[in-house]
Image (tube, helix red, strand yellow):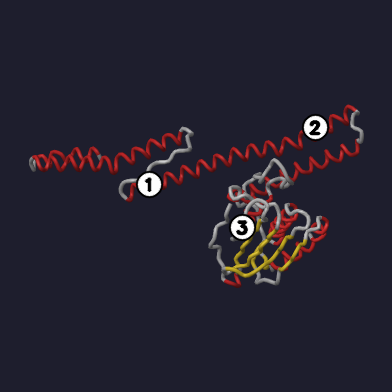
Amino acid sequence: LQDFGTELLPLFAQAGIGGLLVALILAVVITRSIAQPLQTVARAAAEVAEGKFDQQVPIKGPAEIRAVAEAFNRMSAEIRTEQMSQKDLLANVSHDLKTPLTSIQGYAQAIIDGAAPDPRRAARIIYDESARLNRMVVGLTDLARLQAGQLVMSHQPIDLGQLAGAIAQRLEVVAAEKQIALRIDTPSMPPIMGDGDRLAQVITNLISNAITYTPEQGTVHVSTQIRDGGVEMIVRDTGVGIPAEELPRIFERFYQVDKSRGPRRGTGLGLAIAQEIVQAHGGTISAASPGKGRGATFTVWLPSPQLGGTARRRASG
């Protein structure tokens, strides 16, 4: 653009001093309003290429230049978020692998040295920890196949109300052991097309989590309803809740809220797998919570052909 302005100078010079002045003003305006913002974006892009992902550029200039700057800032923010997620993933994977492996190694060494006071108990711990590692590997494999679209799912008519109700009833014993009131309000719903086993996996995970993270004398409420051309299942509890800053990341692999205390979320893959399964059915899954200690609500929405529903929303988290 600067070159373009320079090429115009001879033309305006022929028009005299006034034309030359106009040309100079035009060159300055072009440089400040277009060339400089683009150069700023170019420099910031070079910084991102070198691994400095916290780059943001000022949004100014003509509409087209502002659009470029806004797009760059969004891209930079997304890259930065993804990098943070990758670092957390590696840290969480390392932690979740180290704990059972350390336990297995310790108890196995005790058995070998004859120092285990109860070899059968030690063997049981080794078995349980190795089973947990196996579940983690299976979960990671399923998650990778789901994300790659390689996991084949059946598509059969399913009454989400009946399915959610049946699973909730099976978990009533678990809730009763913790003295938790499990309320089930799942009337028959218009059919959805989906894989019953995979959707059962999602429902079981959500209800089990609600029971696990709800203290004694608490309540877990499972309900279904028609909404926005589809069918919705809601699992609401009066449990430990989720801090607002944690909600956007609740569906990430291995991400666990408040890792330092409280019950663990199994392998840390359940919600990530649930999200992939729901999205593969054209639906959405979301989490909401008023805050720590104030319970949480998980909502699954799935389109119903009978209602003419289509997936118009994206999953959050």
**Residue type, mark 3 in image:** Ile
Above or below, 178 relative to 157: above
Q: What secondary structure is found at the residue carrying circle 2? A: helix
Residue 187 image offset from top left, x and y in percent: 70, 71
On screen, residue 266 versus residue 85, left or right, reads right
Tag 2: Cα neighbours inside 10 Å, few (<14), some, or many (≥20)? Answer: few
Residue located 29% across and 40% down the image: 35
- Separation of residues labelled 3 and 2 (CA atoms): 39 Å
Q: Which of 149/83 is in front?
A: 83
Q: Is residue 203 left or right of residue 244?
A: right
**Circle 1 Cα neighbour tier, 10 Å, few/some/many (<14 / 14–19 / ≥20):** some
Closer to the N terminus: mark 2 or mark 1?
Answer: 1
Q: Position of residue 32 (x, y in %)?
A: 27, 41
Look at label 2 and name its amino acid: Gln
* Residue that label 3 marks: 285
Give me the residue at 54% from left, 42% from top. 82
Which image quadrant for residue 224?
Answer: bottom right
Q: Residue at x 70, y 62 (%)?
A: 196
Q: Amino acid at mark 1?
A: Val
Residue that mark 1 sits on: 68
For disc 2, the marked residue is: 105
- Distance in Å between CA atoms under marks 1 and 3: 32 Å
